[in-house]
Amino acid sequence: MVDFAPKVAIACQGGGTHAAFEVGVLTEVLKDMEARNRFELVGFSGTSAGALCALMVWYGLAPKKRRPESGSIAEAIKSINSFWDWFAASTPAEIMQNAFSHLALTAQEQEVPVLGINAPVFGLNPRGVLSHAFLAELQRLGVRKEYIDFDAMLTKACPEFDDIDWPNVPARLLLGASEIVNGVETVFDSDCNIPDNGGKHTEASVAHRWRQRLPLSLRGVAASGTLPAVREAEKIDDG
């Protein structure tokens, strides 16, 4: 009888409610893995909020060049739970802003008036001057920068991203996004960050599984996690 550990890859579904569920599930999966060592985690994938869950577990497992002892199950558990704790509204101003945003988005989706005002009035073009002024004012009222600035949140959550020891990362990470100018389905692949691709996955194993493959980056994570009604699209290279 051959004794071997099954290889497991985890796909994280998008959507805020799904992500909240995934945090708990991933935490328990990691705890079980640490206690029983019954399987080997070889990969993660995700899109939108699922991309954030997949990223944070993968980042915790990834070794960092200046910290040889880094990269562990304990770090992965801390990484994903700390991220969603930071992401949650915590100050009075954030709680009020969160409640208003939920009300406005719900009104827009259902196309019903709020307090006698048509729902589109509540809409803010993420690229507009009014939107930028509104976000700036929120910070003055006590809203943390990382709560309303996705880039700031990712930088805080992954401070050693540029120091990852890519050839020794134990698991592969694939994050999905749509390139909106040309309609190209895109995957941000951690294998692309390995020098010379590590001889791995040079081509998609199934034709047309994706149209474009780019290196993993925090900008790619932001692209995958962007909600168009709230944040303008991430510009990466020419897309």
Image: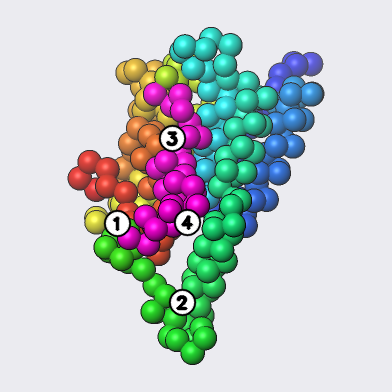
Q: Which residue is mark 4?
A: 141
The region drawn magenta spans: 133-162
Going from the N terminus, do you reach mark 4 or mark 2 first? 2
Residue type at numbered disc 1: Ile
Q: Is residue 105 left or right of residue 216?
A: right
Residue 161: say if magenta. Answer: yes
Choose between 21 and 191: the one closer to the eye.
21
Q: Which residue is mark 3?
A: 155
Going from the N terminus, do you reach mark 3 or mark 1 first? 3
Most common secondary structure along the magenta stretch: helix
Q: How is the image coloured?
A: rainbow
Mark closer to the observer (4, 1): 4
Residue type at numbered disc 4: Leu
Q: Residue 108 — which label?
A: 2
- Kindly report the distance in space between the C-alpha atoms of the residues bearing marks 4 and 2: 25 Å
Residue at image location 61% in from the left, 37% down from the top: 82
Q: Residue 180 — which label?
A: 1
Residue type at numbered disc 3: Thr
For the N terminus, the quadrant is top right
Going from the N terminus, do you reach mark 3 or mark 2 first? 2
Q: Where residue 87 sits: x, y (%)? A: 56, 47
Query: SS of the residue at dot 2?
Result: helix
Residue 45: say if magenta. Answer: no
Going from the N terminus, do you reach mark 2 or mark 1 first? 2
Query: SS of the residue at dot 3?
Result: helix
